[in-house]
Image (spheres, helix red, strand yellow):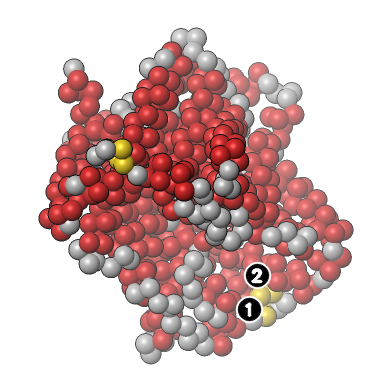
Amino acid sequence: MILTRYRPALLALIGLPLIIILYWTQQPLILSSFGARILANQGTTLALAAMAQMAVVLTRGVDLSVGAMVGLSNAIAATYMGDSLTSATLTIIAVLLIGTAAGALNGVIVAVGRIQPIIVTLASLYIYGGLALLVLPEPGGSVPDWFATGLTDSTGPVPNGLIFLLAVIFLVWLPIMSSRLGRSIYAVGDNEGAAYVSGLNVVRAKIVAYAMSGLLAALAGLFLTAQTTSGDATIGSGYTLNSVAAVVFGGVPLMGGRGVVLGPVLAAYFLSIIVSVLFAAGISPFYQSVVQGGLLIIVLAAGSYRALSSPNWLQVLRA
Amino acid sequence: MNATLQGRRSSPALLIAEHSVLVAYILLLLLVGVAIALNPAFGSLGNLKAQLLIASFVGIIAIGQTFVILTGHIDLSVPWNLTFSAILAATCYANGYGIPAAFGLGIGFGALVGAFNAVGVAIFRVHSLVWTLATNALLQGLALLYINGQPPRSTIPPFWRDMVTGDVGGLPMAALLWLVLAVLTIVVLKRTSFGRKVYATGTNETAAFLSGIDTRLVYLTVFIISGASSAVAGLLLTGYASQTYLGMGNDYLLVPIAAVIIGGTSVLGGTGGYVGSIAGTLMVVVLQAVLSTAQIGQAGKNIIFGGIILLLVLLYGRAARVND
């Protein structure tokens, strides 16, 4: 039962330890509390962005604006946090509210406006990216020390980034996804018509999924800000592709309706660490896009082995 | 679907949806009117020619996107396909090969990328949205590796520029090329069996397959057309800017897609056509020009542009209700 449930995440479950071992052979320090902190800090932003993407993919949609929302949150946080506890707290609350609202707006246009998610989020990618540039035209800004170290340091041997991520999973993701509302998100992705006929509120389920995506992207932006201790309006651009890659790699089908959050989270760490491994091995950083894009293509192609092995193309078409 | 249309025949939203091409051309005229009212110089012959030149880059990419979107897919690999094809062609020329070899290499490479996209979509059955996004990242990495992080070598001869901006019968050469390709596209889509196969595949792939259409071949062709048109646009842009540069394709992802969508082609596939895409192309180009003359910075431009695209698709790009 548990095995079946987590089978989609198997690739990431196996891949992550392998890549950490590979990293360890190059950098023995990685298996210390210091190393654990570095590993956690590298992957947590993408893990949160991957969860943001997954919330929407579950409804059989896609959110191309995840990267822009990460950048917008980063720009707002670095510009307005200041030094005082009050201004920082207010900024954090504002970032989370803006992220949720921006996501919900995507959801309203998709669900009520009945426009294809790809068009909506492609357009809002420009809007949120433009807003980020308005807030912070040039890279800069700063964050209070306590905010940066609070999120990126360790508590005992445990990296705070990991604690932050687990808190988000256990306090935000799992309660929502195991509620009636969360079930309806899965149901809408599985079969929208059936969900509607069964009396589920399809519109509300979609809006909540997109709003969650915005909230999680804002959390990713906040963590990224703590990690880089500065702001850059365009810093999020890579997170759209990588969040989709983590979702695919984590065994969540793009057709929606299925998937466990563990898959994309582990896949996000895998994809982040693989870049460090290349770097540690002295391979040109220009390979980063090649490896990430190439890996995604290989996983996508490999995932369709059933289509290739089916003797009847008609069955493939109907799948 | 038919029942839906009959049930809500009187609604103005439906009227707009049914005549989206006409609406697109009316909006275009309004937009040109606004542009001239804001800045009378916009209507000058020189400026109209300059706008037409820019429109031909967008319009040629929109040819590929129209074919692909009509089959119900999308090509997100345009930015780096365009850039890499242009860099390859420019490097080929710089190494002493002639223009025919350079252009052949650029367009051939673009077509090859298109074929690669089609393999993922048609054979591996991966949605083009993700597959072409991955292709784009892969091409970005390969392009950076190819030029080793240095700015690409740019020794673009003056006649390459003349081939793009030169005046023939009052029209820039690039616009003339766009005109020829546009007529060809419309004829292929409306008057050939291949065109009908594109619409059939986009409407219902399984039904198309059962009626004897090799849908895989349709995907292969439309993605090759898209890849080649990205490369052609890259070659034109290289001549226009007299150089190749990283990121030269960045502005050519949303704009042509927006042109196709607001031209009345459905992202779900099967309905629309290139006549609408021409109106859409001219609209987005005029819109960008208006935003530029209003001295709105890049950030504001992106916001307004994205917002207007959303408004336009809300006006006539809506899907059927789930309860229909």
Q: Quadrant of residue A283?
A: bottom left
Which residue bears the numbered disc 2?
Answer: B53
Crowding at dot 2, Cα within 10 Å, few <14 / some 14-19 / many 20+, comes out as: many
Crowding at dot 1, Cα within 10 Å, few <14 / some 14-19 / many 20+, comes out as: many
Decide which of B276, A23 is in the foreground and name it: A23
Quadrant (top left/top right/bottom left/bottom right) for the C terminus of chain A:
top left
Decide which of A126, B268 is in the foreground and name it: A126
**What kind of element bears circle 1?**
helix
Residue for point 16% across, 39% down = A14
Of mark 2 and mark 1, the one earlier in the sequence is 2
- On the question of residue A179 being in view, the answer is yes
Where in the figure is residue B35, as x and y percent of width and height? 80, 58
Amino acid on which the number 1 mark rests in the picture: Thr
Disc number at residue B165? 1
Decide which of B12, B273 is in the foreground and name it: B12
**What kind of element bears circle 2?**
helix
Q: Pointer 1 indicates a residue of which chain?
A: B
Quadrant (top left/top right/bottom left/bottom right) for the N terminus of chain A:
top left
Where in the figure is residue A5, as x and y percent of width and height? 23, 23
- Both labels 2 and 1 in a single chain: yes
- Extreme left residue here? A25
Amino acid on which the number 2 mark rests in the picture: Leu
Where in the figure is residue A280, as x and y percent of width and height? 22, 61
Q: How many marks?
A: 2
- Extreme top residue here? A199
Residue for point 22% across, 67% down = A282
- Extreme bottom residue here? B96
- On the question of residue B305 being in view, the answer is no
Disc number at residue A142? none
Left or right of B322: which side holds B317? right
